[in-house]
């Protein structure tokens, strides 16, 4: 550690790392082991794989690989939840979305640090872009939910939506996809890129405090899913996408 | 006094060059871009722990510890000067591993030069505000004579105020002539040109006034008197330091920068240091090219440094007032 006199010669900025203490403590408080968030509750962590910090290779947590049965259960839960979610009406759904946005903002720093640990992008990007934007998406679509009966009077909810969230903006893309779906009255299942699973688990944990018919699952390919949302350019080219 | 004397070896004092009206007239400032750059610039860097402590020490070394009130008395100025010579408590100095520390200068009205000189005994520069500060609307003869008297009384730095109407009416020749006369009257004393940016309305005026004053030989350009409605801001600072940078590129003269008024928190001071480092480089982090005109700032820096040393914050009134 340089002395103050030495720094006065160089006038360098010096290291200013963001503390990971709270994020690590959060992971620790969950035993660094996460099940799936299905039907409003956590499953036991069964078949797991590691989620690693790309900066130093350390393991952040063990996360669960969903099975076909898990996906079935998730989609079924979402289907069950849909009538109630639609019946709640635009204002009712907006209340939930607003609440999600506020929760995201309240815990913005925890999310930002976790996203950085998990994904490897800079804290500047997660703190100043990903998190504020993710919260804005929920606010924005909460607004649409409120206007739904006037602006989209003839539209009907399509059914359960399956969503794939990529690795590059995990939380932001998740917000980007789930917020409009929920606003429109469609429950959503999402699959997170295996490269960035940990943040989704925090998010799911946050969902427990709100009344959402959302469910987390490992994959989205399912006969009862009525609509799929993909991110990226895979749609016309790879068989997996089809 | 300057911490890095080796860096100052090639320093040569700015001398007047011809007024280039073509250059002045072509100056443009993109207001939105300046605001945007200012918003990200001041907050994109941070200094923590021992680095923050060192930067705050540097901020102290760059302070022109100022009292410019109608009710200034020799007693208040004496207290200010003693504070300027020992800005930090002895126990803090020891904990920070420092042997000596002073502010950059003290800044007072003409009448207070004498009391200040008696206390300082040449150990610290005395800056005097002059030319009918703060409005600058006396006769030219009075203003030049005021500079001469201040220099004779012992001021080694003179903070002059420009005549704002010359900027507002676009009379650049008049501004140039006035500044040249002030610089001449200062002689060996360094001259800081106060642009009163809060009165100049547009950033373009700020840029043009900066250029005219530098062309006329100003050693420093300074934002404000502290008496305008709006004092130093980051966007205004950005425009002024960019002018300094371009002037240096064109002429080889290094002109100093002094934000004044409204810089009262340690955090703000660090933002200004960041602006200087990012836009002009390390040499402009030293008192011969960077000053902050302030008084209560010192107390806040003391509080932060005490927190760095002890881990606890104290109330401002626990520290000797500047």
Image (spheres, rainbow, N blue to C red):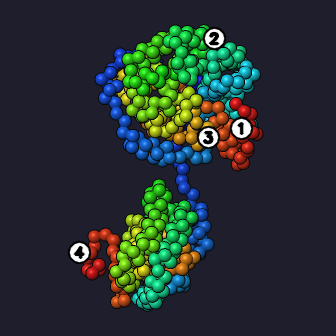
Q: Residue furthest left?
A: A237
Chain letter for the residue marked with disc 2 in the picture: B
Q: Quadrant of the N terminus of chain B?
A: top right
Q: What residue sits right under mark 4 in the picture?
A: A237
Upstream in sequence: badge 1 or badge 2 = 1
Report how far apart the C-alphas of labels 2 and 3 lie in the structure.
33 Å
Give x and y (percent) for residue B264: 61, 37
Q: What residue sits right under mark 1 in the picture?
A: B92
Q: Looking at the rendered structure, which numbered label has been put on residue B214?
A: none
Upstream in sequence: badge 1 or badge 3 = 1
Q: Quadrant of residue B246?
A: top left
Report how far apart the C-alphas of labels 3 and 4 lie in the structure.
58 Å
Chain letter for the residue marked with disc 1 in the picture: B
Residue situated in front as seen by the camera: A161 or A1: A161
What kind of element bears circle 1?
helix
Cβ–Cβ under 8 Å for marks 3 and 4:
no
Q: Looking at the rendered structure, which numbered label has been put on residue B153?
A: 2
Which residue is found at the position 42% from the left and 34% from the top? Answer: B202
Chain letter for the residue marked with disc 4 in the picture: A
Report how far apart the C-alphas of labels 1 and 4 lie in the structure.
67 Å
Q: Nearest to the eye among marks 3 and 4: give it.
A: 3
Upstream in sequence: badge 2 or badge 3 = 2
Q: Quadrant of the C terminus of chain B?
A: top right
Cβ–Cβ under 8 Å for marks 1 and 2:
no
Same chain, labels 1 and 2: yes
Cβ–Cβ under 8 Å for marks 1 and 4:
no
Which residue is found at the position 70% from the left and 33% from the top? Answer: B88
Q: Nearest to the eye among marks 1 and 2: give it.
A: 2
Is any part of residue B292 visible from this angle? no
Vertical placement of residue B191 versus A167, above or below: above
Cβ–Cβ under 8 Å for marks 2 and 3:
no
Q: Looking at the rendered structure, which numbered label has been put on residue B265?
A: 3
């Amino acid at each position: 550690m340089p002395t103050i006199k030495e720094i006065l010669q160089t006038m360098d900025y010096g290291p200013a790392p963001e503390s990971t203490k709270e994020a690590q403590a959060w992971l620790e408080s969950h035993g660094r082991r996460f099940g799936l968030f299905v039907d409003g509750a956590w499953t036991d962590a069964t078949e797991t794989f590691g989620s690693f910090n790309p900066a130093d290779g350390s393991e952040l947590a063990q996360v669960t690989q969903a099975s076909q049965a898990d996906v079935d259960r998730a989609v079924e839960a979402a289907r069950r939840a849909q009538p109630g979610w639609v019946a709640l009406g635009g204002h009712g759904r907006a209340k939930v979305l607003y609440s999600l946005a506020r929760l995201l903002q309240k815990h913005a720093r925890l999310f930002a640090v976790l996203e950085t640990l998990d994904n490897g992008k800079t804290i500047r990007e997660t703190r100043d872009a990903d998190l504020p934007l993710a919260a804005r998406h929920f606010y924005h679509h909460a607004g649409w939910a409120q206007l739904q009966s006037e602006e989209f009077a003839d539209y009907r909810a399509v059914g359960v939506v399956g969503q794939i969230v990529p690795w590059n903006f995990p939380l932001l893309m998740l917000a980007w996809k789930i917020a409009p779906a929920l606003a429109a009255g469609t429950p959503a299942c999402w699959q997170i890129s295996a490269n960035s699973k940990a943040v989704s688990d925090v998010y799911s944990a946050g969902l427990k405090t709100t009344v959402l018919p959302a469910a987390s699952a490992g994959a989205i390919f399912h006969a009862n899913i009525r609509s799929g949302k993909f991110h990226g350019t895979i749609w016309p080219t790879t068989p997996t996408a089809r | 006094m300057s911490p890095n004397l080796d860096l100052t070896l090639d320093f040569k004092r700015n001398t007047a060059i011809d007024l280039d009206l073509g250059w002045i007239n072509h100056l443009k400032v993109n207001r939105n871009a300046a605001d945007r750059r200012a918003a990200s610039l001041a907050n994109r860097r941070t200094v923590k722990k021992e680095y923050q402590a060192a930067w705050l020490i540097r901020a102290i070394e760059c302070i022109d510890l100022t009292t410019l009130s109608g009710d200034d008395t020799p007693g208040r100025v004496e207290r200010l000067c003693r504070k300027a010579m020992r800005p930090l408590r002895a126990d803090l100095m020891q904990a920070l591993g420092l042997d000596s520390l002073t502010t950059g200068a003290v800044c007072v009205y003409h009448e207070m030069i004498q009391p200040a000189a008696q206390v300082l005994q040449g150990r610290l520069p005395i800056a005097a505000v002059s030319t009918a500060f703060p409005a600058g609307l006396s006769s030219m003869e009075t203003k030049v004579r005021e500079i001469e008297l201040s220099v004779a009384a012992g001021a080694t730095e003179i903070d002059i105020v420009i005549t704002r109407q010359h900027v507002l009416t676009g009379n650049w020749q008049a501004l140039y002539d006035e500044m040249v006369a002030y610089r001449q009257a200062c002689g060996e004393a360094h001259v800081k040109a106060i642009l009163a940016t809060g009165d100049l309305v547009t950033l373009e005026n700020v840029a043009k006034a900066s250029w005219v004053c530098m062309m006329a030989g100003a050693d420093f350009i300074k934002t404000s008197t502290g008496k305008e409605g709006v004092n130093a801001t980051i966007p205004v600072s950005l425009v002024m330091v960019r002018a300094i940078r371009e002037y240096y590129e064109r002429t080889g003269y290094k002109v100093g920068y002094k934000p004044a008024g409204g810089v009262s928190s340690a955090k703000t001071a660090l933002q200004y240091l960041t602006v200087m480092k990012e836009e002009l480089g390390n040499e402009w982090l030293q008192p011969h090219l960077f000053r902050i005109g302030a008084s209560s700032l010192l107390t806040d820096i003391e509080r932060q440094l005490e927190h760095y040393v002890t881990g606890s914050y104290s109330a401002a009134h626990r520290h000797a007032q500047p």
